[in-house]
Each structure stands twice: as C-alpha cells, then as structure tokens.
Image (cartoon, rainbow, N blue to C red):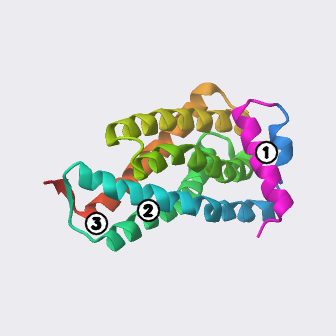
Amino acid sequence: MPTSTEIINAFIGAWKIARRDPTALSHFDFSADAFWRSFAAFIFAMPFYLVFISAEWRMIGEANVVVTNTLLGYTTIEFLSYVAFWILYPVSMVFVCRAANLTQNFAPYIIAYNWSSVLVAVLLAPPYVLYSFGVASIETAAFLILLVFVTALLYRWQIAVTVFRTTPAIAAGIVAFELVLGFLINFVASSFLGIGPQ
C-alpha cells in the first residue's frame, strides 16, 4: 500500500495536471513499485462508484426502463464492470503504447491515470448526490453528468499530453480508445443486466 505522503503527493500532482502546472509530474513516484501501488487508487474511488451505481439504479426506474435483475445483481455487475476497466485499460494500453511508440512513458502514464481517476470520481459525484437527495431532477442530473463527463475527457486528454509528451492528436486518440473500451465493457455488462424499455 502507498504511504499517506505518496497518496497526498499523487493527488496534488493529479490536480496540478488539470491546472497545467509544469511541476505536476514531480509530485508522482514513478518507480516500479509505485506503478503497482497506484492501483490502490481504486479503493479511494470505490465509494464514489457505489454512489453512482445506487443513483443510476434509481434513474433507470424513474426512466421506466426494465432491468431483469435485482438491485444486488445490478450492483454486482456494475461494480465488476468498474473492476474490469481498471484491469483491461492498463493491459490494453501496453499494446497502444507499443503501436504509438510511447512505451517509455507507459508506467508513468498509468500511475498518473490511476490517481487522477479519484479526482474524476470526486468531480462526478455532485450530480449523483444531488439527484439522490431529490435536489436535482433526473434531467438536471443527466445534464450535469454530461458536462462533467466532457470535462473529464478534456482532463484525460491533458494527462496524455503531459505524461506522454505527445501531440494533441495522439492524446485525443488515446482518449478515444478509452471511450471505446468503456463502451464495450458497458455493452457486455448491459447484456447481463437485461435492460430494456418498459
């Protein structure tokens, strides 16, 4: 497990990437052990994922969409889809980096990406929380989620540009790959959920 100092520094670095601070990467530990420790960020993101899943279950019900599964089954499948992404994305990025000649910065990218995922989760949380407490309607929440989602994509793009020191176009391609992978995982998860119109 990472130390508290490493965790705090990683979050500072992730925040500074968003601000385009040139000192951002100096806050990360890019050692081989730090690569594996960065996956501990999933533990910090997990409570937010559970909030998202709970709110999405309510949204599905309010939108008159039938899910041929129980809340427990839905939660399990959705949670496993998050786990699958955390595993499949870094594995698949090995091949993407080889194809794009970015292998040298693969580990630093995954380290920064993993820790930044917690900030993305924090950013996504307010719309879901507002909806869960009845402060925001499903339409308002969906609009806010879309805005945050676009912001998160721009942030991911900035991470790719900063860590890989690559062109904006290649960074955009990396973000596009992330989107496609996420879509495929969600598609598979949906097939197990049995989602359909009421």
Q: Position of residue 94 (x, y in %)?
A: 61, 53
**Residue at which label 3 appears:** 192
> Which quarter of the figure has residue 24?
top right
Quarter of the image containing the N terminus? bottom right
**Residue at which label 1 appears:** 12
Kind of residue sitting beneath label 1: Ile
Per the rendered image, the range of residues in magenta is 1-21
Marking on residue 81: 2
**Outermost residue, left direction?**
198
Quarter of the image containing the C terminus? bottom left
Q: Classify 14 as above or below 44.
A: above
Kind of residue sitting beneath label 2: Ser
For the residue pair 100 and 55, the one nearer the viewer reads as 55
Residue 113 in view in this figure: yes
Q: Classify 79 as above or below 162.
A: below
Kind of residue sitting beneath label 3: Phe
The mark that comes first in sequence, 3 or 1, is 1
Cβ–Cβ below 8 Å for labels 3 and 2?
no
The mark that comes first in sequence, 3 or 2, is 2
